[in-house]
Image (cartoon, grey):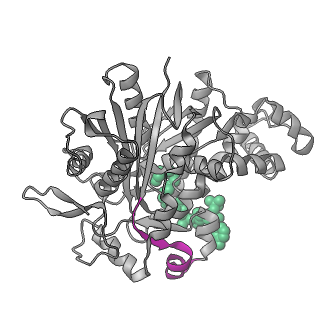
């Protein structure tokens, strides 16, 4: 059976930067370490006045199409995953296609377009849709464009404000891919939860502490379901494990718990037994409470071992490089984690072709999904083509007053008209409103 997977990736960040340690922490009266060490974040990417989910998505897609030498007729499907949509009827993918049609001779009239919603997991679900469309033989030789795009802004003074971000990830899904091939096994953990939601409001209502617990609970269920589907979860069998990354500290928690779960009954547990003992087994305890306390103690000891630290440095830490600098991109976050891991592999010259990724996606509300991918030949040149480091470096560094204004510009309730901090060049830009309240875009040479 021919492989189907990701053939190319492009990453586009918002062009403004809010430095959390230098600019945000002093205004909040917090230690910089709360952000840089606790949450694991250095900065947030924010959109300039002329940027939004459409411009970032279109700019990422344009660069991807140019790089892969594609014309509109080569794309049979455009799906956008977002939690930041501004229209309950017209999908963002139509706006993105409209933008791209400004710079190509052909059009996307033949392409099936849609929008996927399930909080941050919808990007992964859109990849699934594309995979199934190709596997079902309905693509007529065409490729799918899947774009995860969000302006992940929180209300001012919400605890989530420190984890904001804005960016898009465009992914080309095709047969014989050049980055990763998808596997068929999947695991799900899905439940009706009220942890993070946007009931027809722009900024989310969040129960932050609870959202962390729900993330961990659903991820655990997904892992067990993945194992039940025959999926291999031995932690040493993966080059990287990219997780949904609302902030790196969340992944640090998930990785420790996941590692403990996955080494149970394996050679790793055996080798560590002399140092920290074996994992507690439920049957050895009189109550759940005692058992959980013993599990917590074991997990704390486990994450202090050299074995765990080395595994974390190799398998998890590289997936957080981009996230640390840009914050939470909601739907795009797990996909920048994958790109980030591969980017580090390239920088360190690691031979990872043929190796596996275990991808852990999560969306509030809530659902986790786990699947494996195989890194395929061609990944080096695809990842080398990314210019995310240059984009991160080129961002305009906002003062706190400028940040307050920019937040207001992107607040639908506020009336703010300020000059952009950067100048659009060779990109799509928001260009005002049409007669029916639609947003308009222009390609600026
Ligand atoms: N040095 C080092 N560490 C420090 C520190 C310092 N000076 N000060 C604080 N810390 C540590 C704290 O100990 C804490 O670490 P632990 O969790 O390991 O104990 C960490 O920094 C954060 O500190 P707080 O818990 O006090 O931070 P907070 O309560 O202000 O905010 C949050 C944390 C509730 C998660 C908040 O960021 C939030 O609401 N975020 C939005 C929701 C979110 O991202 N949830 C994640 C799961 S849901 C999801 O994944 C979907 C999604 O994308 C939104």
Write down which quadrant ligand 1 falls in.
bottom right
Nearer to us in this view, 351 or 163? 351
Q: Position of residue 19 (x, y in %)?
A: 51, 74
Is 17 a magenta residue? yes
The outermost residue toward the left is 435
79 to 332, vertically: above or below: above
- The residue lying toward the viewer, choosing from 148 and 206, is 148
* Magenta segment: 13-30
195 relative to 166, above or below = above
Classify residue 128 as left or right of residue 298: left
- Residue at 60% from the left image edge and 36% from the top image edge: 358
Image-quadrant location for residue 134: top left
Residue 13 sits above or below residue 60 on the image: below
Queried whether the magenta region covers residue 86, the answer comes back as no
- Most foreground residue, 426 or 165: 426
On the image, which quarter does residue 81 sit in?
top left
């Amino acid at each position: 059976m021919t492989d189907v997977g990701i053939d190319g990736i492009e990453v586009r960040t918002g062009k403004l930067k809010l430095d959390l340690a230098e600019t945000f922490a002093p205004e909040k009266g917090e230690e910089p370490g709360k952000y840089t060490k606790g949450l694991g974040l250095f900065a947030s990417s924010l959109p300039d006045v002329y940027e939004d989910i459409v411009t970032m998505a279109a700019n990422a897609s344009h660069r991807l199409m140019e790089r892969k030498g594609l014309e509109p007729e080569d794309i049979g499907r455009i799906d956008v995953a977002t939690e930041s949509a501004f229209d309950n009827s017209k999908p963002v993918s139509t706006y993105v296609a409209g933008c791209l049609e400004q710079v190509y001779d052909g059009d996307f009239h033949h392409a099936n377009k849609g929008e996927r919603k399930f909080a941050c997991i919808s990007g992964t679900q859109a990849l699934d849709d594309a995979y199934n469309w190709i596997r079902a033989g309905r693509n007529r030789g065409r490729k799918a464009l899947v774009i995860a795009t969000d302006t992940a802004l929180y209300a001012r003074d919400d605890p989530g404000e420190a984890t904001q971000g804005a960016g898009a990830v465009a992914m080309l899904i095709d047969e014989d891919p050049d980055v990763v091939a998808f596997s068929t096994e999947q695991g799900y953990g899905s439940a009706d939860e009220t942890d993070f939601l946007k009931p027809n409001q722009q900024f989310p209502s969040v129960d932050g502490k609870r959202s962390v617990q729900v993330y961990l609970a659903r991820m655990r269920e997904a892992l067990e379901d993945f194992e039940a589907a025959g999926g291999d979860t031995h932690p040493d069998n993966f080059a990287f494990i990219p997780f949904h990354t609302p902030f790196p500290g969340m992944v640090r928690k998930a990785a420790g718990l996941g590692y403990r779960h996955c080494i149970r009954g394996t050679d790793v547990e055996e080798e560590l037994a002399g140092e920290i003992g074996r994992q507690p087994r439920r049957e050895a305890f009189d109550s759940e409470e005692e058992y959980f306390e013993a599990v917590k103690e074991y997990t704390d000891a486990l994450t202090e071992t050299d074995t765990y630290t080395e595994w974390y440095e190799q398998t998890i830490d590289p997936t957080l490089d981009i996230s640390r600098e840009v914050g939470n991109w909601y739907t795009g976050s797990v996909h920048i984690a994958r790109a980030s891991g591969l980017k580090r592999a390239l920088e360190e010259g690691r031979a990872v072709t043929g190796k596996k990724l275990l991808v852990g996606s999560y969306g509030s509300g809530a659902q986790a999904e786990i699947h494996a991918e195989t890194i395929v030949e061609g990944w080096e040149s695809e990842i080398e083509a990314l210019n995310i480091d240059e984009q991160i470096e080129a961002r305009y560094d906002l003062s706190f007053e400028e940040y307050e204004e920019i937040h207001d510009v992107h607040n639908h309730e506020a009336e703010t008209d300020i000059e952009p901090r950067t100048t659009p060049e060779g990109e799509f830009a928001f260009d005002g409103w049409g007669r029916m309240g639609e947003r308009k875009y222009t390609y600026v040479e």
